[in-house]
Image (cartoon, helix red, strand yellow):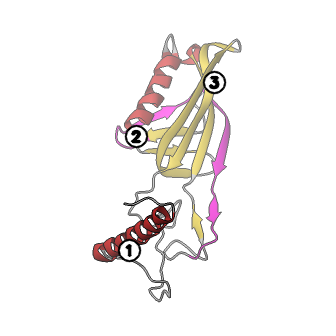
Amino acid sequence: MESTAYVVCQKLKYTYHFTGVTAIEHNLALNIGNDASQGGDIINGARNLPDQVTLSVIETDAVRGAGGSARMLEAMASLKKNRYLCKVVTSMGTYKDMLLTEITAAEDEENPCGWTGSLAFMKYVPASSSSSSGGGSYSSVRKTSNNSSTKKNTGTKAAAAVVAGAASAVGSALQALLQRAGIKS
């Protein structure tokens, strides 16, 4: 019997069914910021965060045969290492373009011929994407005002003049101090 949740590697065109899935955590979050940013997926400083799905799985050699659970862990590690895009299918929904970001696996006395653990997937959102479904662009565009009343030093000549003026003032003050002390420079 195969689990109800499974993972499809889009590049390898392979489906991974687990011995069992004990829990599925869906994290569909919105980040609300204090700054008013502009962008197609941002309204009043709020932006969609990438969807996250975590599968709590059980793998055992009793179903897969000797070494089957180790091969499944190795396959999941390969998906993560190579950053393959996956489709995660659950009874609550299907998530496309997901990256396996974290694997935890424990061997214990309840499952001596296998492992229990979790697989954390996160929606891949390209940096140049402006899609608002299941993620979005994380680069915010801010408008700044050019009507600043503060003077800014933007050139090297002006900066050199400021430094020279400061050095001259310090030098003059130092010479005056030395003369009062009776020391000739």
Amino acid on which disc 3 is placed:
Thr
Amino acid on which disc 1 is placed:
Gly
Badge 1 marks a residue whose secondary structure is helix
Q: CA distance from mark 1 to mark 2?
A: 57 Å
Residue ID at (39%, 41%): 84
Figure quadrant of the N terminus: top right
Please tell me how crowded label 2 is: few (under 14), some (14-19), or many (20+) other residues with Cα within 10 Å.
some
Mark 1 or mark 2: whose residue is earlier in sequence: 2
In percent of width and height, residue 107 lies at 63, 16
Of marks 1 and 2, the one in the foreground: 1
Who is closer to the viewer here, 16 or 131?
131
Q: As drawn, is 23 to the left or to the right of 168?
A: right
Please tell me how crowded label 1 is: few (under 14), some (14-19), or many (20+) other residues with Cα within 10 Å.
few
The residue under label 2 is 83
Q: Does 31 appear in magenta? A: yes
Magenta-tinted stretch: 9-36
Q: CA distance from mark 1 to mark 3?
A: 71 Å
Task: In the rendered structure, find residue 116 and report the number of the disc placed on it.
Answer: 3
Q: Quadrant of residue 43?
A: bottom right
Who is closer to the viewer here, 91 or 100?
100
Q: Does 30 appear in magenta? A: yes
Task: In the rendered structure, find residue 165 and report the number of the disc placed on it.
Answer: 1
